Every structure is written in structure tokens, then in C-alpha cells.
Image (cartoon, grey):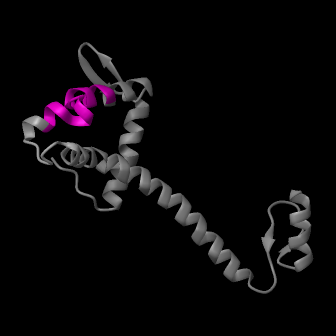
Amino acid sequence: MFDKRIDGLVSTGLVEEREGPLVATGKGARTARVFGLFVHAALFFGGWLQVYNLAERGFSLRILIDIDESPGRALSPEEEEAGYGGGLGMGWMLDKRIEGLLSTRLMVERDGSLLATHKGVRVARLFGGLRAFLQIDTPQ
């Protein structure tokens, strides 16, 4: 089935048959290449930025959800701390995050301290560099 689609594209003159990847040729080739680059960039960067944004704002979003789901739609900071995550509390959230980092071997626990592994340091530097490139301030 895929071969029939390729043959159809070749017969229209939109692509040329040769070894390796298909190459747009003929009328509109430049537009097709620019569009392809745009789609690739949108999917790649849009996907990464979406994951980053979810990680960056997930905590704040959960607080807003907790407030919205509370009976009076208002919570004190102490109530939010105790009831965060549908009543599990912020301690649960912290434990969950730490367990995730330990299970993915981004950090280890040694002598009562949490230490970043080489992999964890690389990830931190990658996303720290992304934050710097995007000029996103990190609260101190």
C-alpha cells in the first residue's frame, strides 16, 4: 500500500524516485520543503515546550483545582498544604516526585541525602539551559 502511494507521488512529479529519502521536486517544491520544516519544528518544539510547561505549571494548576473543588472555593495556605492533590497533602506530592526521580535514576539517596546522578545532572543542565535560553527566571 505504501509503495502505491509513493508511485502516485512520483507519477505526479511532486517527488523524484532515487535511493534514500524522497525529495520534493517540480512545481511548489520550495513551498513543500518550507511547509515540511514548519510542521517538523511545530511538532518537535511544540511537544517539548508542552512537556516543559506542564512540568513547570503542574503544581500551580493543582492548587487552583484544589481551590475550585473545595466547598467554599477558598482555602487557607494551611488547608491547601494539608489537602493538596485531592487530600493527599504536599508531603505526598514531594514523596511522589522524589520516588519518580529515584526510580528513573536521576538521583540516589546516600547517607540521608539526595544526590543527583550523572544522568540527573545532564537533565538538569539541559532544562536549565532551556530556561536560560527562553529567559525564564528561576525563583531563588
Count every numbered label the image shows and give the total. Answer: 0
| Viewer-closest of 94 and 66 | 66
Placement of 55 over or under 27, stated as above or below = above
Q: Is residue 124 above or below residue 51?
A: above
Residue shown at 43% from the left, 50% from the top: 51
Residue at 25%, 47% (x, y): give it. Answer: 65
In this view, the residue in front, 111 or 99, is 99
Q: In which quarter of the image is the N terminus?
A: bottom right
* Residue 113 in the image: above or below residue 104: above
Relative image position of residue 72 (x, y in whole percent): 12, 46
Instruction: Name the residue rendered at 14%, 34% in the picture.
Output: 81
Q: Specify the farthest residue to the top.
A: 111
Q: Quadrant of residue 33?
A: bottom right
Instruction: Look at the image and say whether residue 89 sits in the magenta stretch.
Output: yes
Q: Is residue 86 one of those drawn in magenta?
A: yes
Quarter of image, res 85: top left
Q: Using residue 46 as the reference point, say whether residue 52 is left or right of it.
A: left
Question: Residue 47: x and y, percent?
Answer: 49, 55
Q: Magenta: predominant secondary structure element?
A: helix
**Residue lying at 39% horizontally and 51% vertically, measured from the top left:** 52
Q: Position of residue 49 (x, y in %)?
A: 42, 57
Residue 137: where, in percent of width, then height? 23, 56
- Residue 57 in sight from this viewpoint: yes
In front here: 45 or 19? 45
- The magenta-colored residue range is 80-96
Pick out the residue farthest to the front: 71
